[in-house]
Image (tube, rainbow, N blue to C red):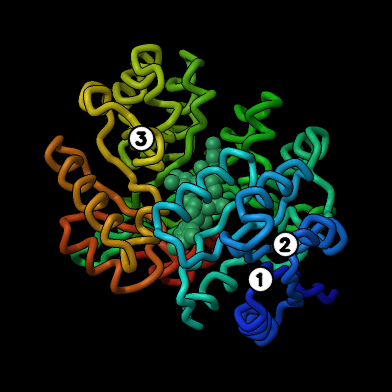
Amino acid sequence: MTQRRSRILVVDDDPSVARVLTRVAQRLGFEATAVIEPGQVVARVERLQPEMILLDLSMPGLDGVEILRALALGRSRAQICLISGADRDVIDAARDLGHELGLQMAEPLHKPLGREQIERTLRAIEPAGTHRGTGSPEPSVADLDEALRAGNIVPHYQPKLDLASGRMTGVEVLARWNSAKLGVVSPGRFIPLAESSGAINRLTDAIARRSFEELAGLGESSNKLGIAVNLSPRLLHDLVYPDHLLTLALERGIDPDRVTLEITESEAMRNPTRYLDILVRFRLKGFHLSVDDFGTGFSSLVHLYKLPFEEIKIDRTFVADLRESQEARVIVKAMIALGRGLGLSVVAEGIEDGETAETLVRFGCDAGQGYHFGAPHGIEELRGGRVPA
Ligand code: C2E
Ligand code: CA
Ligand code: CA
């Protein structure tokens, strides 16, 4: 089956910029069109249903922010990449606004635009057929239910490395849904559905069970490999969950000491005392705890200090900006110092190049993950010799 090409809509009132962007996108194999008249954007988006919109933030008549509001009203599922010559904090604030409005915001492009920067952004777009902007139907609760029953929600594994030595020390388990009807569905589309429909317990069980089995099956050479499992904050209400997870692990020969539970910052920190009992229980059973997406949830330092977490995972949005933003460098450096000062292990996620990895080592970051070291893959890749002896 041939896959149709992903569509990109370029919105820039400067025809020469629009032309350059369109050309670069076409050369990369995208179906790209430009619109230089801001007033036509919304109608074009509706007709074209692009996977990505490259949107100039400052245009006469209708500015990028108004377009964002209109796209949100039209419930656009396209990834939106802002382009602007304005100050970084203005662009970042606009991107945050887009997030707030429920839009899919990609990393912004800063003018003057370099070809490498443009290509990197475009390459990050999911191919047509796997992205929600393609007009493919949104998965329903019934679809998800069926997928869980059929065992079509499976774990993929991304290597986690000790940054100083480059040694692989563990893997993060990331859920993937292989759907005959919808293609490969990414977790962003089904985790929220699982959470709101109450299927998250079953989903987490399915992922934990299968990943424990597959990793135990790798044999002795990898029985020290750490296993990071994402835990929905919804499961933190269930007082017997720690026992349940312990049984799942032990029945498959997995020592809980190998397992780190990653819990996103926003939820875990909002009401720390409410979660304290269950977090303590996980620790008592021998599991480790990590604050995921650190830096996005405005957690109070007091909470971080009081809760039984042992690791912080710096959110990939900060890591992605390290090379180009002095502000990001200041923030990441401070996060690493804070984490280490509190005796926590510090992990950076979303490392996409060697320069970023080197900067993180210089800042004293312990561990890292990202496409630079390896994307998430099925168990065969781990079996294929990537496991440290
Ligand atoms: P997360 O826990 O922050 O996971 C890291 C995400 O970053 C993964 O996206 C991974 O594929 C992606 N990633 C890895 N390296 C890079 C990189 O170098 N650059 C960039 N830009 N991205 C990178 P994925 O697999 O789409 O997962 C999205 C989110 O879904 C996860 O974010 C996690 O919060 C959630 N999730 C995934 N699996 C599960 C699960 O089994 N249970 C629960 N509750 N949530 C899950
Ligand atoms: Ca995670
Ligand atoms: Ca994360």
Does 37 sit above or below residue 286? below
As measured in the structure, the alpha-carbon distance from the residue carrying label 2 to the one carrying label 3 is 55 Å
What is the three-letter code of the residue carrying label 1?
A: Asp
Find disc 2 in the rendering and name its residue.
38
Q: Please tell me whether mark 2 or mark 3 is closer to you in this view.
A: 2
Are the two marked residues, 2 and 1, in contact with CB atoms closer than 8 angstroms?
Answer: yes
Tell me the CA gap for discs 3 and 1. 57 Å
Tell me the SS state at disc 3.
helix
Mark 1 closeness class: few <14, some 14–19, many ≥20 residues within 10 Å: some
The part of the image, by quadrant, that contains residue 298 is top left
- Of residue 133 and residue 227, the one placed in the foreground of this image is 133
The quadrant of the rendering that contains the N terminus is bottom right
Q: Which mark is residue 13?
A: 1
Coordinates of residue 168 in the picture (x, y in percent)? 31, 62
> In which quarter of the view is residue 321 placed?
bottom left
Q: Quadrant of ligand 2?
A: top left
- Of all residues, the one furthest to the front in this rendering is 61
The residue under label 3 is which amino acid type? Pro
Q: Which is more N-terminal, label 1 or label 3?
A: 1
Residue at the spot x=63%, y=55% of the render?
63
Q: Residue at x 62, y 30 (%)?
A: 200
Q: Left or right: 202 with respect to 267?
A: right
- Residue 382 at x, y = what percent? 47, 64
Alpha-carbon span between mark 2 and mark 1: 7 Å
Residue 167 quadrant: bottom left
Q: Position of residue 116 (x, y in %)?
A: 48, 81
- In the depicted view, which residue is nearer to us: 253 or 86? 86
For residue 99, above or below residue 270: below
Q: Which residue is mark 3?
A: 256
Q: Which mark is residue 291?
A: none
- Please indicate whether residue 41 sits to the left or right of residue 285 in the image: right
The reply, left or right, for residue 2 in relation to residue 85 is: right
